[in-house]
């Protein structure tokens, strides 16, 4: 009897302990789900707030040196967060297709880095910010590494010339295929944008020829020009841009498709170039105020990366003097500051 009693109290306390363990792990699960839900609510609220706060802003104007960009409705405005797990939080015109322009540059750079390594990028293009406009020819003459960095036009045209290809068609296919892989969608060339841009590309043509003259271009200049101009004329939505950025936030693996596009060890090198040169001659101010690696385009798109967390993408056509979208800049900056996302914030 005594023995039985002892036994039953032993069983009782075991059951109690098990129940306690079960309860506490249940509360951990519930807590984790709550935190995730709270986080989702907060992120949705943040994109809504950023959109609401700046949608009335009318400063700046569409790019018009590429004639067709002047015809894009200036009122369009979209803000998107894509987490490294592929969750999407969106506000505004997030499915409108616009020209990717220079926001394509870091993603093509990823392919060049993957093919040739970051040392080749440093030697054959350079990684110093210019402090000058994106299409500066003076920068080419002043700086010793003549294509300067991969995110200004000169360096981006040089990138295209470095893509390993034995024909123009193959070069273009690889560039488009890579951008599509980053977006996790089949992206398309916007023919009218390409035509409009290629026909008015006198400044870029001068840059390509100067680079070729200095042996800083590694294919036929006009071929590099055509493929570069097509690269800039690829259509994306703000959501696509978000997924492209989320791939970098996720260490080089697209969260939608699971495909690795850049070795994790090279992601920091790519993000460093984005931080120092992604906003052209406003990169210092952008680092100072938002503290995130990012890339802008004259189509009005901007994508910023919170390493290991998420991408914030925004789109609105009206630009400032440096060629950066005013509303998109402000919206991303707002979200970065709201959550203290600056990579320099140690708190
Ligand atoms: N395709 C544009 C150009 O070459 C890209 C510039 C940009 O988006 N900043 O001028």
Image (cartoon, rainbow, N blue to C red):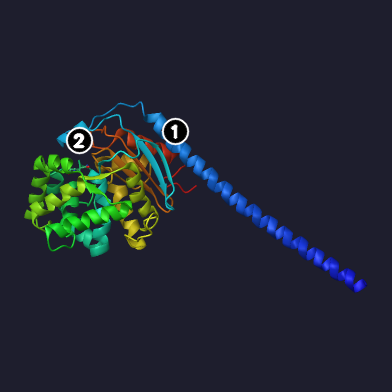
Above or below, 6 against 235 in this view is below
Q: Position of residue 19 (x, y in %)?
A: 73, 59
Q: Check disc 2 and report its element: helix, strand or loop.
A: helix
The span from disc 2 to disc 1 (Cα, nearest Å) is 27 Å
Q: Position of residue 289 (x, y in %)?
A: 37, 39
**Residue that appears at 41% across and 40% down:** 90
The residue positioned farthest toward the right in the image shown: 1
- Percent across and percent down for residue 202 are 8, 42
Sequence-earlier tag: 2 or 1: 1
**Taking the image as four quarters, which one is ligand 1 found in?**
top left
Which circle marks residue 69 in the picture? 2
Residue at (24% x, 51% y) in the render? 128
Left or right, residue 199 beside residue 251: left
Q: Residues within 10 Å of mark 1 (few under 14, many from 20)?
A: some
Tell me residue 311's x, y (percent): 38, 47
Label drawn at residue 49:
1
Name the disc covering residue 226, or none: none
Quadrant holding the N terminus: bottom right
- Residue 65, can we see it? no
């Amino acid at each position: 009897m005594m023995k039985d009693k002892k036994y039953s109290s032993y069983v009782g306390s075991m059951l109690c302990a098990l129940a306690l363990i079960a309860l506490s792990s249940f509360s951990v699960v519930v807590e984790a789900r709550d935190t995730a839900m709270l986080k989702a609510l907060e992120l949705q609220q943040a994109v809504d707030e950023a959109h609401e706060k700046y949608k009335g802003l009318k400063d700046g104007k569409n790019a018009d040196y590429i004639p067709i960009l002047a015809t894009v409705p200036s009122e369009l405005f979209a803000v998107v967060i894509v987490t490294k797990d592929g969750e999407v939080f969106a506000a505004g015109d997030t499915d409108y297709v616009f020209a990717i322009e220079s926001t394509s540059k870091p993603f093509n750079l990823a392919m060049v880095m993957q093919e040739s390594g970051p040392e080749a990028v440093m030697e054959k293009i350079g990684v110093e910010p210019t402090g000058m406009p994106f299409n500066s020819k003076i920068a080419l003459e002043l700086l010793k590494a003549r294509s300067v960095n991969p995110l200004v036009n000169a360096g981006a045209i040089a990138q295209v010339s470095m893509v390993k290809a034995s024909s123009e068609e193959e070069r273009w296919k690889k560039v488009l295929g890579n951008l599509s892989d980053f977006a996790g969608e089949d992206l398309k060339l916007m023919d009218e944008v390409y035509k409009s841009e290629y026909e008015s590309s006198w400044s870029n043509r001068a840059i390509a020829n100067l680079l070729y003259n200095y042996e800083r271009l590694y294919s036929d200049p006009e071929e590099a020009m055509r493929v570069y101009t097509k690269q800039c004329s690829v259509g994306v939505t703000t959501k696509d841009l978000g997924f492209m950025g989320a791939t970098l936030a996720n260490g080089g693996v697209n969260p939608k498709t699971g495909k690795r596009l850049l070795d994790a060890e090279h992601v920091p090198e790519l993000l460093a170039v984005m931080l120092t040169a992604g906003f052209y001659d406003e990169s210092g101010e952008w680092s100072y105020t938002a503290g995130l690696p990012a890339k802008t385009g004259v189509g009005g798109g901007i994508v910023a990366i919170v390493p290991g967390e998420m991408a914030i993408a925004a789109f609105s056509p009206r630009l400032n003097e440096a060629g950066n979208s005013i509303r998109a800049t402000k919206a991303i900056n707002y979200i970065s500051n709201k959550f203290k996302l600056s990579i320099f914030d140690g708190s």
